[in-house]
Image (cartoon, coloured by chain):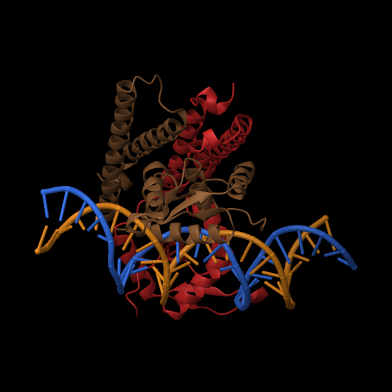
Chain colours: A red, B brown, C blue, D orange
Amino acid sequence: MDPHRLNATAASLLGFLHDGPMTGWDLVVTAERRIGDFWSLTQSQVYRELAAMAAAGLVKAGERGPRDRQPYIITKAGRAAFAEWSRQEAGEESIRFPLLLIVMFGRQIPSGRLAAVVAEHRRRHAERLASYEQELADAIATAEADGAGDLDPYPRATLDFGLRYERAVLDWFDALPKEIRGA
Amino acid sequence: MDPHRLNATAASLLGFLHDGPMTGWDLVVTAERRIGDFWSLTQSQVYRELAAMAAAGLVKAGERGPRDRQPYIITKAGRAAFAEWSRQEAGEESIRFPLLLIVMFGRQIPSGRLAAVVAEHRRRHAERLASYEQELADAIATAEADGAGDLDPYPRATLDFGLRYERAVLDWFDALPKEIRGA
DNA sequence: TGGTACATGTAACATGTTACATGATTAG
DNA sequence: CTAATCATGTAACATGTTACATGTACCA
């Protein structure tokens, strides 16, 4: 209908719906699990986008199930819109990293405070790296148990990004000068 | 006045205003140069935040200069608000990386298309890494010419982050399997 | 039978984006 | 003189966040 370009959030929902009908709730949970590390979205947005996409004919509501579950099914127009989105040049990533602001304005910040914030963030990143490593180990174990040869390369690639990113961030923390990390 | 927590964008403007009065225009240009790589903001936002902060007493308007330049001066309340912001736990970074969405939904995307998008993004990141390396070289050259010993550690640290990030991203591109990078 | 997870949605607001309107000053 | 850059701002809209309201089904 409208040649209205999809936003990445809506496109992701359509991406998931390629694998079969899902409810808003399913989509929230799935998105959090599968793309949450590099594309955040909230429950509110999911319902809003679904309503908008239903109005635009990109998805259609299926029959209500138990607990008033409302499944949505991707339509032909929805597949076309997704294909069109993937054809458009994907935009640059945007990183919004409040810690780097704190570091940049470090001269304005009491040095103990700066060091504490940095240490706290380093801890969180170490934790995140560990959880990615666990995730990879689990995926490998599952694939072996299933007798499947290799991991699905697509999620594997995004996980690999996360691993490399977190390792780079930790290396950065460890190379910070003492003005920033503390004595 | 209001114990209204500053957002990171407003806080950044106050951060810059610590070094002296600046106009909206100055702030747009300065922010783009100094924090643009990890915190984007637009000209519209800058004027909006300045107006809001002026109303809240965090900055005050100075006398208009040539070309109707309107400088803003940080107030005592503004410094307090900035300090308060830096005291609050800084939030997690958010990365929103459309390319990773494309990769995640790779199975839904024609493989030539996927490979082309990936190649284009790799090119951009290589370019960005080169520009960071140039920036570092320039900063070192300038510091030497000025007879200054070391670089300012704060912007140096943020630049270092950029360098490490871009190197990690390039390594990731180069490690992608052929399903994604193309044959 | 009571708490937890499931499930849908709305409302209000904050933030970010894009496009436009207007004009002054400067450099070539 | 004229094009580019400087400079301020508004309007409209898109997207993202937070809080709330309502109720269902499962399981211990």
* Number of numbered discs on residues: 0
Residue A62 image position (x, y, % from top left) = 52, 78
Comparing A144 with B9, the one in front is B9
The answer, for residue B103, to whether it is visible in the render is: no
Query: Where does the image place residue A116, in percent across and percent down from the top left?
Result: 63, 32
What residue is rendered at 54% in x and 28% in y? A180
Picture residue at 41% right of the left edge, 61% below the top = B44
Does the image show residue A115?
Answer: yes
Reply above or below: B104 against A75: above
Residue A138 placement, left or right of B41? right
Q: Which residue is drawn at 30% across and 40% down?
A: B128
Q: Which quarter of the figure is the N terminus of chain B placed in?
A: bottom right
Is residue C18 shown left or right of residue D10?
Answer: left
Q: What's the residue at 47%, 78% (across, down)?
A: A54
The answer to which quarter of the image holds residue C4 is bottom right
Q: Nearer the viewer, residue B133 or B149?
A: B149
Locate the C terminus of chain B and report the quarter of the image it occupies.
Answer: top left
Residue B168, horizontal then vertical, whole percent: 39, 35
Quadrant of res D26? bottom right
Q: Is residue B84 above or below residue A119?
A: below
Question: In the image, A180: left or right of B170?
Answer: right
Depth order, front residue of C13/B119 = C13
Residue A150 rendering spot, x and y as whole percentages = 43, 42
